[in-house]
Amino acid sequence: MLRLVLPLNGVPDSIAAAQAPRPLYGAAATRRLEQKFAAALPPHTLMDRAGTAVARLARAWQPHARRIHVLAGGGNNGGDGLLAAARLRQAGFGERIEVRWLGQEERLPADARWALAQARAAGVAFVEEAPQDAPDLVIDALLGAGLHRPLEGEMLAALRWLQTCPSPTLCVDLPSGLDADLGHWWADAPVQPAGPRITLALLTLKPGLFTGAGRAAAGEAIWCDDLDVDVCAALPDAWLVGPDGWPHRDRLRADHASHKGRRGDVLIIGGVPAAAHHGIGMTGAALLAGRAALRAGAGRVWVAVPAPPSSTPAFDPAQPALMWRTVEAALAEGLPQRATVVAGCGAGSALVPVLGALMQQTPRLVLDADALNALGAAAVPGSNSPWLAALRDRAARGWITVLTPHPLEAARLLDAQVADVQRARLQAAEQLAQRTEAIVVLKGSGTVVTMPGALPRIVASGSGWLATAGSGDVLAGLLGARLAAWTPVEDMSALLDAVAATAALHGTLPAASSSPIWAPTAADLAP
Ligand SMILES: NC(=O)C1=CN([C@@H]2O[C@H](COP(=O)(O)OP(=O)(O)OC[C@H]3O[C@@H](n4cnc5c(N)ncnc54)[C@H](O)[C@@H]3O)[C@@H](O)[C@H]2O)[C@@H](O)CC1
Protein backbone atom coordinates (compact mmCIF):
# COMPACT_ATOMS: atom_id res chain seq x y z
CA MET A 1 0.00 0.00 0.00
CA LEU A 2 1.23 3.47 -0.90
CA ARG A 3 1.37 5.99 1.96
CA LEU A 4 2.49 9.58 2.26
CA VAL A 5 4.97 9.76 5.13
CA LEU A 6 6.19 13.35 5.07
CA PRO A 7 4.55 15.82 2.71
CA LEU A 8 6.17 19.17 2.06
CA ASN A 9 8.87 19.57 4.68
CA GLY A 10 7.88 21.97 7.41
CA VAL A 11 4.23 22.66 6.64
CA PRO A 12 1.85 21.93 9.51
CA ASP A 13 0.03 19.17 7.62
CA SER A 14 3.22 17.17 7.54
CA ILE A 15 3.02 16.81 11.28
CA ALA A 16 -0.23 14.84 11.24
CA ALA A 17 1.26 12.50 8.69
CA ALA A 18 4.34 11.97 10.78
CA GLN A 19 2.58 11.51 14.10
CA ALA A 20 2.36 7.78 14.41
CA PRO A 21 5.74 6.28 15.27
CA ARG A 22 7.00 4.47 12.19
CA PRO A 23 9.58 1.69 12.16
CA LEU A 24 12.81 2.33 10.26
CA TYR A 25 14.91 -0.49 8.83
CA GLY A 26 18.50 -0.18 7.65
CA ALA A 27 19.92 -1.84 4.53
CA ALA A 28 20.77 -5.17 6.20
CA ALA A 29 17.38 -5.51 7.92
CA THR A 30 15.63 -4.55 4.68
CA ARG A 31 17.58 -7.18 2.76
CA ARG A 32 16.59 -9.83 5.30
CA LEU A 33 12.94 -8.83 4.96
CA GLU A 34 13.19 -8.79 1.20
CA GLN A 35 14.66 -12.31 1.17
CA LYS A 36 12.04 -13.59 3.57
CA PHE A 37 9.08 -12.26 1.59
CA ALA A 38 10.60 -13.04 -1.81
CA ALA A 39 10.96 -16.69 -0.77
CA ALA A 40 7.23 -16.91 -0.14
CA LEU A 41 6.17 -15.26 -3.41
CA PRO A 42 6.50 -16.14 -7.10
CA PRO A 43 9.84 -14.98 -8.64
CA HIS A 44 10.29 -11.24 -9.19
CA THR A 45 7.02 -10.35 -7.43
CA LEU A 46 8.59 -7.73 -5.17
CA MET A 47 10.43 -6.05 -8.00
CA ASP A 48 7.28 -6.16 -10.09
CA ARG A 49 5.37 -4.44 -7.30
CA ALA A 50 8.20 -1.95 -6.74
CA GLY A 51 8.50 -0.93 -10.39
CA THR A 52 4.72 -0.73 -10.73
CA ALA A 53 4.52 1.48 -7.61
CA VAL A 54 7.17 3.82 -9.04
CA ALA A 55 5.32 4.05 -12.36
CA ARG A 56 2.00 4.73 -10.59
CA LEU A 57 3.39 7.53 -8.44
CA ALA A 58 5.25 9.05 -11.41
CA ARG A 59 2.00 9.27 -13.36
CA ALA A 60 0.08 10.72 -10.42
CA TRP A 61 2.76 13.30 -9.63
CA GLN A 62 3.54 14.47 -13.18
CA PRO A 63 0.49 13.44 -15.21
CA HIS A 64 1.38 15.69 -18.13
CA ALA A 65 5.00 14.59 -18.51
CA ARG A 66 5.82 13.76 -22.11
CA ARG A 67 9.50 12.92 -22.02
CA ILE A 68 10.53 10.68 -19.12
CA HIS A 69 14.21 9.97 -18.50
CA VAL A 70 15.09 7.03 -16.24
CA LEU A 71 18.62 6.99 -14.83
CA ALA A 72 19.27 3.38 -13.79
CA GLY A 73 22.23 1.72 -12.07
CA GLY A 74 23.54 -1.83 -12.18
CA GLY A 75 21.81 -3.23 -9.08
CA ASN A 76 18.24 -3.87 -8.02
CA ASN A 77 17.58 -0.17 -7.58
CA GLY A 78 18.29 0.16 -11.29
CA GLY A 79 16.01 -2.87 -11.75
CA ASP A 80 13.15 -0.94 -10.14
CA GLY A 81 13.79 1.91 -12.58
CA LEU A 82 13.89 -0.42 -15.58
CA LEU A 83 10.64 -2.03 -14.57
CA ALA A 84 8.99 1.35 -13.96
CA ALA A 85 10.05 2.35 -17.49
CA ALA A 86 8.49 -0.85 -18.85
CA ARG A 87 5.23 -0.24 -16.99
CA LEU A 88 5.04 3.41 -18.09
CA ARG A 89 5.62 2.41 -21.68
CA GLN A 90 3.05 -0.39 -21.50
CA ALA A 91 0.52 2.11 -20.10
CA GLY A 92 1.15 4.41 -23.07
CA PHE A 93 2.26 7.18 -20.69
CA GLY A 94 3.94 10.24 -22.21
CA GLU A 95 5.52 10.37 -25.64
CA ARG A 96 8.98 9.01 -24.94
CA ILE A 97 10.31 6.81 -22.15
CA GLU A 98 14.09 6.57 -22.26
CA VAL A 99 16.53 4.78 -19.96
CA ARG A 100 20.16 5.63 -19.38
CA TRP A 101 21.37 2.39 -17.90
CA LEU A 102 24.81 2.29 -16.28
CA GLY A 103 24.86 -1.43 -15.47
CA GLN A 104 26.74 -4.40 -16.87
CA GLU A 105 24.57 -7.24 -18.08
CA GLU A 106 26.88 -10.01 -16.85
CA ARG A 107 26.88 -8.60 -13.28
CA LEU A 108 23.15 -8.03 -12.93
CA PRO A 109 21.27 -9.58 -10.00
CA ALA A 110 18.46 -11.92 -11.10
CA ASP A 111 15.59 -9.51 -10.42
CA ALA A 112 17.26 -6.65 -12.27
CA ARG A 113 18.10 -8.98 -15.18
CA TRP A 114 14.42 -9.82 -15.42
CA ALA A 115 13.51 -6.11 -15.24
CA LEU A 116 15.98 -5.34 -18.07
CA ALA A 117 14.29 -7.96 -20.23
CA GLN A 118 10.89 -6.43 -19.39
CA ALA A 119 12.07 -2.96 -20.41
CA ARG A 120 13.50 -4.23 -23.69
CA ALA A 121 10.35 -6.20 -24.45
CA ALA A 122 8.22 -3.13 -23.78
CA GLY A 123 10.18 -1.15 -26.37
CA VAL A 124 11.74 1.35 -23.98
CA ALA A 125 14.44 3.51 -25.65
CA PHE A 126 18.00 3.12 -24.28
CA VAL A 127 20.33 6.14 -24.47
CA GLU A 128 24.07 6.45 -23.81
CA GLU A 129 24.34 10.10 -22.80
CA ALA A 130 22.73 12.40 -20.22
CA PRO A 131 20.09 14.61 -21.88
CA GLN A 132 21.26 18.05 -23.05
CA ASP A 133 17.90 19.62 -22.16
CA ALA A 134 15.62 19.06 -19.15
CA PRO A 135 13.19 16.12 -19.49
CA ASP A 136 9.65 16.56 -18.12
CA LEU A 137 10.31 13.92 -15.48
CA VAL A 138 13.42 12.12 -14.26
CA ILE A 139 13.27 8.82 -12.39
CA ASP A 140 16.35 8.36 -10.23
CA ALA A 141 17.13 4.64 -9.96
CA LEU A 142 20.91 4.92 -9.99
CA LEU A 143 21.68 3.70 -6.47
CA GLY A 144 19.55 2.65 -3.53
CA ALA A 145 20.18 0.70 -0.38
CA GLY A 146 23.35 -0.87 -1.84
CA LEU A 147 25.44 2.32 -1.59
CA HIS A 148 28.03 2.37 1.21
CA ARG A 149 31.11 3.91 -0.43
CA PRO A 150 32.07 7.11 -2.25
CA LEU A 151 30.99 7.66 -5.84
CA GLU A 152 33.59 8.04 -8.54
CA GLY A 153 33.95 8.23 -12.32
CA GLU A 154 30.87 7.64 -14.46
CA MET A 155 28.54 7.19 -11.46
CA LEU A 156 29.71 10.45 -9.91
CA ALA A 157 29.28 12.31 -13.19
CA ALA A 158 25.76 10.89 -13.53
CA LEU A 159 24.89 11.95 -10.00
CA ARG A 160 26.24 15.46 -10.55
CA TRP A 161 24.00 15.73 -13.62
CA LEU A 162 21.05 14.48 -11.56
CA GLN A 163 21.58 16.94 -8.69
CA THR A 164 21.86 19.94 -11.01
CA CYS A 165 19.04 18.92 -13.37
CA PRO A 166 16.03 21.27 -12.93
CA SER A 167 13.49 18.59 -13.92
CA PRO A 168 11.00 17.14 -11.44
CA THR A 169 12.65 13.99 -10.11
CA LEU A 170 11.21 10.92 -8.45
CA CYS A 171 13.84 9.05 -6.44
CA VAL A 172 13.37 5.29 -6.21
CA ASP A 173 13.72 4.01 -2.65
CA LEU A 174 16.41 6.56 -1.70
CA PRO A 175 17.97 9.57 -3.39
CA SER A 176 21.08 8.26 -5.16
CA GLY A 177 24.17 9.31 -3.19
CA LEU A 178 22.52 8.81 0.22
CA ASP A 179 23.52 6.05 2.62
CA ALA A 180 20.39 4.17 3.75
CA ASP A 181 21.73 3.56 7.25
CA LEU A 182 23.73 6.68 8.06
CA GLY A 183 22.13 9.52 6.14
CA HIS A 184 25.65 10.21 4.89
CA TRP A 185 26.07 11.75 1.45
CA TRP A 186 28.67 9.76 -0.46
CA ALA A 187 29.22 12.08 -3.41
CA ASP A 188 31.10 15.24 -4.21
CA ALA A 189 27.88 16.71 -5.61
CA PRO A 190 25.26 19.08 -4.16
CA VAL A 191 22.95 17.41 -1.62
CA GLN A 192 20.09 19.78 -2.33
CA PRO A 193 18.59 19.05 -5.75
CA ALA A 194 18.12 21.87 -8.24
CA GLY A 195 14.58 20.87 -9.18
CA PRO A 196 11.40 19.65 -7.45
CA ARG A 197 11.82 16.19 -6.01
CA ILE A 198 9.97 13.45 -4.18
CA THR A 199 11.17 10.08 -2.90
CA LEU A 200 9.30 6.79 -2.88
CA ALA A 201 10.69 4.37 -0.27
CA LEU A 202 10.07 0.73 -1.12
CA LEU A 203 9.28 -2.07 1.28
CA THR A 204 10.71 -0.15 4.27
CA LEU A 205 11.54 3.36 5.40
CA LYS A 206 15.29 3.63 5.97
CA PRO A 207 16.82 5.71 8.81
CA GLY A 208 19.12 7.57 6.42
CA LEU A 209 16.11 9.21 4.77
CA PHE A 210 15.37 11.17 7.92
CA THR A 211 18.68 12.29 9.38
CA GLY A 212 21.96 13.77 8.17
CA ALA A 213 21.67 14.58 4.46
CA GLY A 214 18.45 12.56 4.10
CA ARG A 215 15.80 15.23 4.43
CA ALA A 216 17.63 17.72 2.19
CA ALA A 217 18.25 15.11 -0.50
CA ALA A 218 14.83 13.42 -0.42
CA GLY A 219 12.98 16.54 -1.53
CA GLU A 220 9.51 17.86 -0.87
CA ALA A 221 7.76 14.67 0.13
CA ILE A 222 8.63 11.15 1.21
CA TRP A 223 6.26 8.36 0.21
CA CYS A 224 6.45 4.70 1.13
CA ASP A 225 5.04 1.61 -0.55
CA ASP A 226 5.25 -1.56 1.56
CA LEU A 227 4.86 -3.74 -1.57
CA ASP A 228 1.83 -5.31 0.08
CA VAL A 229 3.78 -7.26 2.66
CA ASP A 230 3.65 -6.83 6.42
CA VAL A 231 7.14 -5.70 7.41
CA CYS A 232 6.09 -4.18 10.72
CA ALA A 233 6.32 -7.47 12.59
CA ALA A 234 10.13 -7.26 12.37
CA LEU A 235 12.18 -5.43 15.01
CA PRO A 236 13.24 -2.08 13.53
CA ASP A 237 16.62 -0.34 13.77
CA ALA A 238 15.05 2.96 14.84
CA TRP A 239 11.71 4.79 15.08
CA LEU A 240 10.52 7.86 13.25
CA VAL A 241 8.53 9.97 15.71
CA GLY A 242 6.28 13.01 15.73
CA PRO A 243 4.98 15.17 18.58
CA ASP A 244 2.35 12.61 19.57
CA GLY A 245 2.09 12.41 23.35
CA TRP A 246 2.95 16.04 23.97
CA PRO A 247 0.67 17.31 26.79
CA HIS A 248 -1.51 19.46 24.66
CA ARG A 249 -2.87 22.72 26.03
CA ASP A 250 -6.40 21.31 25.87
CA ARG A 251 -5.34 18.67 28.33
CA LEU A 252 -3.97 21.34 30.66
CA ARG A 253 -7.27 23.20 30.34
CA ALA A 254 -9.30 20.11 31.12
CA ASP A 255 -7.35 19.45 34.32
CA HIS A 256 -9.71 21.56 36.46
CA ALA A 257 -8.38 20.45 39.82
CA SER A 258 -4.81 21.34 38.96
CA HIS A 259 -2.64 24.01 40.54
CA LYS A 260 0.71 25.51 39.64
CA GLY A 261 2.57 23.20 42.00
CA ARG A 262 1.30 20.17 40.15
CA ARG A 263 2.34 21.32 36.72
CA GLY A 264 6.03 21.05 37.55
CA ASP A 265 8.80 23.50 38.48
CA VAL A 266 11.65 24.48 36.19
CA LEU A 267 14.84 26.28 37.10
CA ILE A 268 16.83 27.72 34.20
CA ILE A 269 20.48 28.42 35.00
CA GLY A 270 22.18 30.72 32.54
CA GLY A 271 21.75 34.11 30.93
CA VAL A 272 24.93 35.72 32.21
CA PRO A 273 24.69 39.54 31.80
CA ALA A 274 27.37 41.55 30.02
CA ALA A 275 28.25 43.42 33.21
CA ALA A 276 29.35 40.17 34.85
CA HIS A 277 31.06 38.50 31.88
CA HIS A 278 33.71 40.66 30.17
CA GLY A 279 31.06 42.68 28.36
CA ILE A 280 29.55 39.59 26.71
CA GLY A 281 25.89 39.30 27.69
CA MET A 282 23.74 36.22 27.06
CA THR A 283 20.61 37.02 29.05
CA GLY A 284 18.44 36.33 26.01
CA ALA A 285 19.32 32.62 25.99
CA ALA A 286 17.94 32.05 29.49
CA LEU A 287 14.95 34.27 28.72
CA LEU A 288 14.06 32.14 25.71
CA ALA A 289 14.43 28.92 27.69
CA GLY A 290 12.36 30.30 30.58
CA ARG A 291 9.60 31.60 28.33
CA ALA A 292 9.48 28.28 26.45
CA ALA A 293 9.18 26.36 29.74
CA LEU A 294 6.29 28.58 30.82
CA ARG A 295 4.58 28.33 27.44
CA ALA A 296 4.98 24.57 27.54
CA GLY A 297 2.89 24.42 30.68
CA ALA A 298 5.38 24.42 33.57
CA GLY A 299 3.67 25.66 36.74
CA ARG A 300 6.55 27.82 38.00
CA VAL A 301 9.73 28.86 36.26
CA TRP A 302 12.77 30.50 37.84
CA VAL A 303 15.70 31.95 35.97
CA ALA A 304 18.93 31.91 38.00
CA VAL A 305 21.69 34.11 36.65
CA PRO A 306 25.36 33.51 37.47
CA ALA A 307 25.94 37.14 38.42
CA PRO A 308 25.68 39.48 41.42
CA PRO A 309 22.19 40.74 42.39
CA SER A 310 22.98 44.18 40.95
CA SER A 311 23.17 42.80 37.40
CA THR A 312 20.24 40.38 37.62
CA PRO A 313 17.21 41.52 35.57
CA ALA A 314 14.28 42.78 37.64
CA PHE A 315 11.67 40.99 35.51
CA ASP A 316 10.77 39.98 31.97
CA PRO A 317 8.13 42.36 30.55
CA ALA A 318 6.95 39.70 28.05
CA GLN A 319 6.61 36.99 30.72
CA PRO A 320 6.48 38.69 34.13
CA ALA A 321 5.69 35.31 35.69
CA LEU A 322 9.36 34.33 35.31
CA MET A 323 11.03 34.58 38.71
CA TRP A 324 14.58 35.87 38.74
CA ARG A 325 17.31 34.79 41.13
CA THR A 326 21.05 34.78 41.37
CA VAL A 327 22.49 31.26 41.15
CA GLU A 328 23.66 31.63 44.75
CA ALA A 329 20.15 32.45 45.94
CA ALA A 330 18.61 29.61 43.93
CA LEU A 331 21.06 27.12 45.50
CA ALA A 332 20.48 28.54 48.98
CA GLU A 333 16.70 28.14 48.50
CA GLY A 334 17.17 24.50 47.53
CA LEU A 335 15.55 24.99 44.11
CA PRO A 336 17.81 22.46 42.34
CA GLN A 337 16.50 19.70 44.63
CA ARG A 338 12.84 20.29 43.81
CA ALA A 339 12.79 21.78 40.31
CA THR A 340 13.87 20.31 36.99
CA VAL A 341 17.06 22.18 36.17
CA VAL A 342 17.96 23.35 32.68
CA ALA A 343 21.60 24.40 32.85
CA GLY A 344 23.74 26.05 30.26
CA CYS A 345 21.62 28.46 28.19
CA GLY A 346 23.97 31.45 27.95
CA ALA A 347 25.80 30.60 31.17
CA GLY A 348 29.33 30.96 29.80
CA SER A 349 32.15 29.66 31.97
CA ALA A 350 30.30 30.92 35.07
CA LEU A 351 28.48 27.60 35.23
CA VAL A 352 31.57 25.51 35.97
CA PRO A 353 31.75 26.24 39.73
CA VAL A 354 28.14 25.13 40.30
CA LEU A 355 27.90 22.23 37.86
CA GLY A 356 29.16 19.70 40.41
CA ALA A 357 26.52 20.77 42.93
CA LEU A 358 23.79 20.53 40.28
CA MET A 359 24.91 17.03 39.29
CA GLN A 360 24.69 15.94 42.94
CA GLN A 361 21.47 17.70 43.90
CA THR A 362 19.14 17.66 40.91
CA PRO A 363 17.16 14.51 40.11
CA ARG A 364 16.08 15.87 36.71
CA LEU A 365 18.72 17.75 34.79
CA VAL A 366 18.95 19.07 31.23
CA LEU A 367 22.49 20.00 30.19
CA ASP A 368 22.62 22.33 27.21
CA ALA A 369 25.17 24.54 25.45
CA ASP A 370 27.71 25.90 27.98
CA ALA A 371 26.94 23.07 30.40
CA LEU A 372 27.97 20.60 27.68
CA ASN A 373 31.08 22.61 26.89
CA ALA A 374 32.00 22.48 30.57
CA LEU A 375 32.04 18.66 30.41
CA GLY A 376 34.94 18.74 27.91
CA ALA A 377 35.77 15.43 26.22
CA ALA A 378 34.03 13.48 28.97
CA ALA A 379 32.62 10.84 26.62
CA VAL A 380 35.84 9.55 25.03
CA PRO A 381 36.56 5.85 25.69
CA GLY A 382 38.54 5.34 28.89
CA SER A 383 37.89 8.90 30.05
CA ASN A 384 38.62 9.46 33.72
CA SER A 385 36.80 12.78 33.72
CA PRO A 386 35.08 13.54 37.03
CA TRP A 387 32.11 14.69 34.97
CA LEU A 388 31.74 11.24 33.44
CA ALA A 389 31.82 9.71 36.91
CA ALA A 390 29.19 12.23 38.04
CA LEU A 391 26.94 11.43 35.09
CA ARG A 392 27.20 7.69 35.72
CA ASP A 393 26.57 8.20 39.39
CA ARG A 394 23.35 10.01 38.48
CA ALA A 395 22.27 7.11 36.28
CA ALA A 396 23.02 4.65 39.08
CA ARG A 397 20.70 6.64 41.35
CA GLY A 398 17.94 6.48 38.74
CA TRP A 399 18.16 10.23 38.14
CA ILE A 400 17.37 11.67 34.74
CA THR A 401 20.00 13.51 32.70
CA VAL A 402 19.29 14.83 29.23
CA LEU A 403 22.18 16.07 27.07
CA THR A 404 21.18 18.28 24.12
CA PRO A 405 24.30 18.68 21.95
CA HIS A 406 24.38 20.09 18.46
CA PRO A 407 26.94 18.30 16.26
CA LEU A 408 29.88 20.51 17.36
CA GLU A 409 29.10 19.97 21.05
CA ALA A 410 28.71 16.24 20.45
CA ALA A 411 32.08 16.20 18.68
CA ARG A 412 33.72 17.93 21.68
CA LEU A 413 32.23 15.41 24.09
CA LEU A 414 33.46 12.50 21.95
CA ASP A 415 36.77 14.19 21.08
CA ALA A 416 35.87 13.71 17.43
CA GLN A 417 35.38 15.90 14.37
CA VAL A 418 31.98 17.36 13.48
CA ALA A 419 32.21 15.49 10.16
CA ASP A 420 32.53 12.19 12.08
CA VAL A 421 29.39 12.97 14.06
CA GLN A 422 27.45 14.01 10.96
CA ARG A 423 28.64 11.03 8.92
CA ALA A 424 26.88 8.64 11.33
CA ARG A 425 24.50 10.61 13.52
CA LEU A 426 22.63 7.64 14.97
CA GLN A 427 25.85 5.95 15.95
CA ALA A 428 27.32 9.16 17.43
CA ALA A 429 24.22 9.71 19.56
CA GLU A 430 24.24 6.08 20.69
CA GLN A 431 27.95 6.26 21.64
CA LEU A 432 27.35 9.40 23.63
CA ALA A 433 24.38 7.84 25.42
CA GLN A 434 26.25 4.61 26.17
CA ARG A 435 29.24 6.38 27.62
CA THR A 436 27.42 8.99 29.66
CA GLU A 437 24.44 6.78 30.56
CA ALA A 438 22.23 9.76 29.75
CA ILE A 439 19.42 10.53 27.35
CA VAL A 440 20.96 12.22 24.32
CA VAL A 441 19.20 14.64 21.99
CA LEU A 442 21.56 15.11 19.05
CA LYS A 443 20.22 18.18 17.29
CA GLY A 444 20.39 18.90 13.56
CA SER A 445 18.47 17.80 10.48
CA GLY A 446 16.68 14.70 11.77
CA THR A 447 17.28 15.15 15.51
CA VAL A 448 18.26 11.81 17.08
CA VAL A 449 17.00 10.95 20.57
CA THR A 450 18.38 7.91 22.33
CA MET A 451 19.50 6.35 25.61
CA PRO A 452 21.39 3.19 26.55
CA GLY A 453 19.55 0.00 25.67
CA ALA A 454 16.81 1.68 23.62
CA LEU A 455 16.11 1.92 19.92
CA PRO A 456 16.93 5.43 18.74
CA ARG A 457 14.16 7.79 17.74
CA ILE A 458 14.52 10.13 14.77
CA VAL A 459 12.39 13.25 14.92
CA ALA A 460 10.21 13.65 11.83
CA SER A 461 9.47 17.35 12.16
CA GLY A 462 11.79 20.30 11.74
CA SER A 463 13.10 22.35 8.87
CA GLY A 464 15.75 24.90 8.00
CA TRP A 465 13.70 27.45 9.95
CA LEU A 466 15.10 26.01 13.17
CA ALA A 467 18.61 27.09 12.17
CA THR A 468 18.33 30.41 14.00
CA ALA A 469 20.03 31.77 17.13
CA GLY A 470 18.21 30.78 20.30
CA SER A 471 16.11 27.94 18.91
CA GLY A 472 18.22 25.48 20.96
CA ASP A 473 17.47 27.48 24.11
CA VAL A 474 13.76 27.15 23.35
CA LEU A 475 14.15 23.37 23.02
CA ALA A 476 16.00 23.21 26.34
CA GLY A 477 13.14 25.10 28.04
CA LEU A 478 10.52 22.80 26.49
CA LEU A 479 12.47 19.77 27.69
CA GLY A 480 12.63 21.27 31.18
CA ALA A 481 8.84 21.64 31.24
CA ARG A 482 8.30 18.13 29.90
CA LEU A 483 10.61 16.53 32.46
CA ALA A 484 9.08 18.60 35.25
CA ALA A 485 5.65 17.21 34.35
CA TRP A 486 7.00 13.68 34.02
CA THR A 487 5.38 11.08 36.26
CA PRO A 488 7.86 8.30 36.92
CA VAL A 489 6.75 4.96 35.51
CA GLU A 490 8.68 1.74 35.27
CA ASP A 491 9.13 1.84 31.50
CA MET A 492 12.04 4.17 30.77
CA SER A 493 11.32 3.98 27.05
CA ALA A 494 8.18 6.06 27.76
CA LEU A 495 10.50 8.76 29.07
CA LEU A 496 12.53 8.55 25.88
CA ASP A 497 9.30 8.88 23.89
CA ALA A 498 8.37 11.96 25.92
CA VAL A 499 11.76 13.57 25.22
CA ALA A 500 11.50 12.69 21.53
CA ALA A 501 7.93 14.07 21.35
CA THR A 502 9.23 17.31 22.89
CA ALA A 503 11.93 17.61 20.24
CA ALA A 504 9.29 16.85 17.61
CA LEU A 505 7.00 19.54 18.98
CA HIS A 506 9.91 21.98 18.81
CA GLY A 507 10.25 21.09 15.13
CA THR A 508 6.66 22.11 14.48
CA LEU A 509 6.90 25.55 16.12
CA PRO A 510 8.41 27.51 13.23
CA ALA A 511 5.66 26.37 10.86
CA ALA A 512 3.04 27.32 13.43
CA SER A 513 4.42 30.86 13.70
CA SER A 514 5.47 31.45 10.11
CA SER A 515 4.28 34.43 8.12
CA PRO A 516 4.27 34.74 4.34
CA ILE A 517 7.12 37.26 4.59
CA TRP A 518 9.30 36.69 7.63
CA ALA A 519 11.37 33.73 8.67
CA PRO A 520 10.51 32.80 12.27
CA THR A 521 13.01 33.77 14.98
CA ALA A 522 13.50 32.01 18.32
CA ALA A 523 11.32 34.66 19.98
CA ASP A 524 8.45 33.57 17.71
CA LEU A 525 8.91 30.02 18.99
CA ALA A 526 8.56 31.11 22.63
CA PRO A 527 6.86 34.52 22.68
N1 LIG B 1 15.14 -7.36 -5.30
C1 LIG B 1 13.92 -6.93 -5.03
O1 LIG B 1 12.97 -7.64 -5.23
C2 LIG B 1 13.71 -5.57 -4.51
C3 LIG B 1 14.69 -4.61 -4.62
N2 LIG B 1 14.51 -3.36 -4.19
C4 LIG B 1 15.46 -2.35 -4.65
O2 LIG B 1 16.76 -2.85 -4.52
C5 LIG B 1 17.60 -1.85 -4.04
C6 LIG B 1 18.81 -2.47 -3.43
O3 LIG B 1 19.42 -3.16 -4.48
P1 LIG B 1 20.93 -3.58 -4.42
O4 LIG B 1 21.22 -4.26 -3.15
O5 LIG B 1 21.19 -4.32 -5.67
O6 LIG B 1 21.69 -2.22 -4.34
P2 LIG B 1 21.72 -0.95 -5.32
O7 LIG B 1 21.02 -1.20 -6.58
O8 LIG B 1 21.33 0.20 -4.51
O9 LIG B 1 23.28 -0.81 -5.57
C7 LIG B 1 24.04 -1.91 -5.99
C8 LIG B 1 24.72 -1.61 -7.29
O10 LIG B 1 25.39 -0.38 -7.23
C9 LIG B 1 26.79 -0.57 -7.39
N3 LIG B 1 27.46 0.35 -6.48
C10 LIG B 1 27.32 0.42 -5.14
N4 LIG B 1 28.08 1.43 -4.65
C11 LIG B 1 28.67 2.02 -5.70
C12 LIG B 1 29.56 3.11 -5.83
N5 LIG B 1 29.96 3.81 -4.78
N6 LIG B 1 29.99 3.45 -7.07
C13 LIG B 1 29.57 2.75 -8.14
N7 LIG B 1 28.72 1.71 -8.08
C14 LIG B 1 28.28 1.35 -6.86
C15 LIG B 1 27.05 -2.01 -7.09
O11 LIG B 1 28.20 -2.44 -7.74
C16 LIG B 1 25.76 -2.64 -7.63
O12 LIG B 1 25.82 -2.75 -9.03
C17 LIG B 1 16.73 -1.05 -3.14
O13 LIG B 1 17.23 0.23 -2.88
C18 LIG B 1 15.43 -1.04 -3.91
O14 LIG B 1 15.41 0.01 -4.85
C19 LIG B 1 13.26 -2.97 -3.62
O15 LIG B 1 12.51 -2.46 -4.64
C20 LIG B 1 12.52 -4.10 -2.98
C21 LIG B 1 12.41 -5.27 -3.86
Image (cartoon, rainbow, N blue to C red):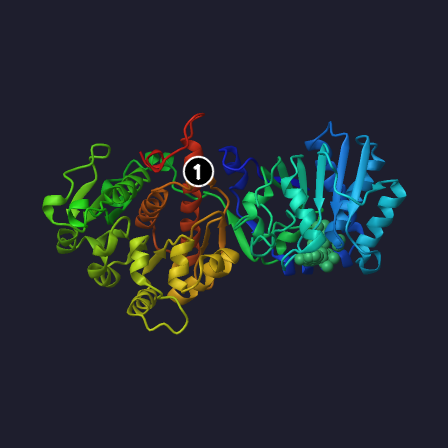
Q: Is residue 396 left or right of residue 362?
A: right
Quadrant observed for ligand 1 in the rendered image = bottom right
**Mark 1, other Cα within 10 Å: few <14 / some 14–19 / many ≥20:** some
Residue type, label 1: Trp
Marker count (numbered)? 1
- Which residue appears farthest toward the left when viewing the image? 310
Q: Nearer the viewer, residue 279 or 497?
A: 279
State the image quarter where residue 300 is shown. top left
Q: Can you say which quadrant of the picture contains the N terminus?
A: top right
Residue 442 in view here: yes
Q: Nearer the viewer, residue 88 or 3?
A: 88
Q: Nearer the viewer, residue 504 or 446?
A: 446
State the image quarter where residue 134 is shown. top right
Q: Is residue 279 left or right of residue 407?
A: left
Q: Nearer the viewer, residue 237 or 420?
A: 420
What is the x, y in percent for residue 488? 35, 55
What is the x, y in percent for residue 314? 14, 38
What is the x, y in percent for residue 182? 56, 56
What is the x, y in percent for residue 524? 35, 33
At a point 82% along the width and 30% down the height, the residue shown is 95
Q: Is mark 1 within 8 Å of ligand 1?
A: no
Q: Which residue is mark 1?
A: 465
Residue 470 to residue 318: above or below: below
Q: Can you say which quadrant of the picture contains the C terminus?
A: top left
State the image quarter where residue 90 is shown. top right
Q: Disc 1 on helix, strand or loop?
A: helix
Q: Is residue 91 left or right of residue 133?
A: right
At a point 83% along the width and 54% down the height, the residue shown is 113
- Which residue appears farthest toward the top when viewing the image? 516
Residue 491 in view here: no
At a point 77% along the width and 44% down the height, the residue shown is 129
